Amino acid sequence: MSSRILLRGGAVYKGFGSEVIKNGFVEIVDGKVAAVGAVSDLTSAFDGEVIDATGKTVVPGIIDTHMHVFHEPQMLRLSEGAAAIWGANYAQSALRAGVTTMRDLGAQSGAAFGLKKALNEGYTVGPRYLVAGRAICMTGGHGWANLSAEADGEDAIRKLARQQIKLGADVIKVMASGGAGTPGELPTEAQFSMQEIRAAVDVAHDFGKPVAAHALATEGIIRAVEAGVDTIEHGVFLDDRAIELMLKKNVALCPTISVYPRIINRGPAGGEAPLVMQKSVALLGPHLDSLRKAVAAGVRIVFGTDATTLYNPVGDFSDEMDLMVKAGMSPVEVIQSATSTAADICRVSNIVGTLEAGKLADVVVVDGDATKDIAALSATNMVFKDGLLVYRKGDGYRSAMLTAKPILKADHAL
C-alpha cells in the first residue's frame, strides 16, 4: 500500500542555493521526495496524510560529517558487541536531533563496522552511518592511543588504507598534524610528509572514497591539500597560501569550531587534562580567525561537530552552528553546509542532501524560521528518515522495535 505524506505550510529550504519557499510544501511518497514547491502550486486535494507545518521550517536531514561514535574511554572496557549497543544508543540520540546521516572519522573499536551494517541494513533505527574505521597517523601521531592506527612510509600507509577499506570504510582519515588531545604533540607541528598523505589519497580515490585530513598546523594543511585530500578537518592555522590552495583545488573546510570552547567550558572538573586545557585556550582565537578568513575568501564550508566526546554530546549542534554564523555565514549558508554540501563531501548526494524529487525523504521540521535564526534548527519538531516519521515532539522517539527489520533465520551474522 502506497504511503503518502504532505508537509504543508512553513518555510521550505531545499538545501541548495539561497531560495526559501515561504509557504511551501514537501510531498513524500513511498519513502522518497515526490514534489517540492509553493502551497499556491497545489491544484487538487491530497490523497494521503496532511501535516501542517505552519510556523515551522522544513529542511533536508542534517548530515554531520565529523563525529566519533566510539571515542569514549569506556570503549576500551567493552566487547565489540557491547560497544555496538552503546553506539546504537548514540545513533538514536543523533536521529532525534535531526541528524539523518553521520560520518564517523575515527573509532577505537571495530564495532563501528558492525553498527554500520546494523543501521544501514535496517536491523536497528538511526542515521545513515558512514565510517572511516581507524584513522591513520604516524608513529606517535595524533590519536595514536585511541582513534588511530600507526603507519610510517608510503607502503605502510597504503596497506593500512586498504585494510580499512577491506573492513568497510567509506572514507579514509589521515592525521596530518598534531592536535590538542594527544600527549607529546603540538597543534602547530606537521605530521606525515606530503608523499605519505598522497599514498593514502591514491588508495582512497582508486576505490572512490574521499579523504579527510585532521590538520591544525599550517604546514600540515598545505601538505594535505597538495596531496589531494577532500576536506581539511579543523583548519586552525589557515594562512593566505593555505586558503589559496584550498580554493584552487576545491578542498572543503570542516571547522568543528565549537570543539575548543567546549573543552574549556568542561574544564578540569569535567576530566580534562591541564595540558589539553592549555592547548585549547591557545587555539580559540586562531581557530575563529581562520574560519572567518576562509568564509570571506569563499572556501567551501562543510558542517561537522566532532561530537560524541564527553564535552561535545551527539546531536547537540547549536554551538557549532551559532559560531559558524558568528564567523560570517548566514543561517541559510549554515544549513546548506549541513545538507547539500555535506552530502557532496560524503559522496551521497545522489540519494540525500536536498529536497528534490527522487531523493530519499530525509526531512527535518523545526519550530520557528531557521533560515533567519539558526538557533531554531535545534528546536526539532519532526524527523523523517527514508520517509518514515521516527520522531515527533510530544510523541518522543518512535521505538526501533516498531520499525527495524526483523532478524530472520536466513540472515547471516551481523
Image (spheres, rainbow, N blue to C red):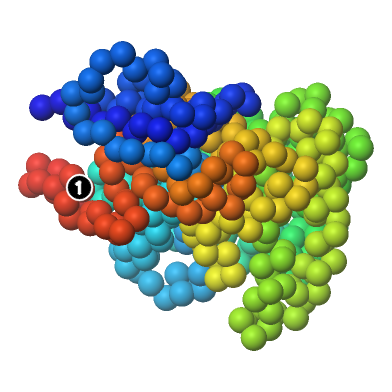
Q: From the viewer's perspective, is 94 left or right of 217? A: left
- Residue 133 appearing in the image: no
Q: From the viewer's perspective, is 136 left or right of 99? A: right
The residue drawn where x is 85% and y is 41% is 293
Specify the quadrant of the image occupied by residue 144.
bottom right
Q: From the viewer's perspective, is 379 left or right of 319? A: left
Residue that badge 1 annotates: 403
Residue 382: x and y, percent?
36, 47
Q: Amino acid at mark 1?
A: Thr
Relative to residue 367, is residue 280 depicted above or below? below
The residue drawn where x is 84% and y is 33% is 297
Of the pair 365 and 282, the residue shown nearer to us: 365
Q: Residue furthest left?
A: 409
Of the pair 365 and 157, the residue shown nearer to us: 365
Residue 205: x and y, percent?
59, 27
Which quadrant holds the N terminus? top left
Q: Residue furthest right?
A: 240
The residue drawn where x is 48% and y is 54% is 379
Relative to residue 281, is residue 169 depicted above or below? above
Residue 385: x and y, percent?
34, 40
Question: What is the secondary structure assignment of the residue under circle 1?
Answer: helix
Crowdedness near tag 1: few (<14), some (14–19) or many (≥20) residues, C-alpha within 10 Å:
some
Of the pair 46 and 297, the residue shown nearer to us: 46
Of the pair 294 and 39, the residue shown nearer to us: 39
Residue 383: x and y, percent?
36, 45
- Residue 18 appearing in the image: yes
Specify the quadrant of the image occupied by residue 82.
bottom left
The residue drawn where x is 26% and y is 33% is 50
Relative to residue 377, is residue 83 depicted above or below? below
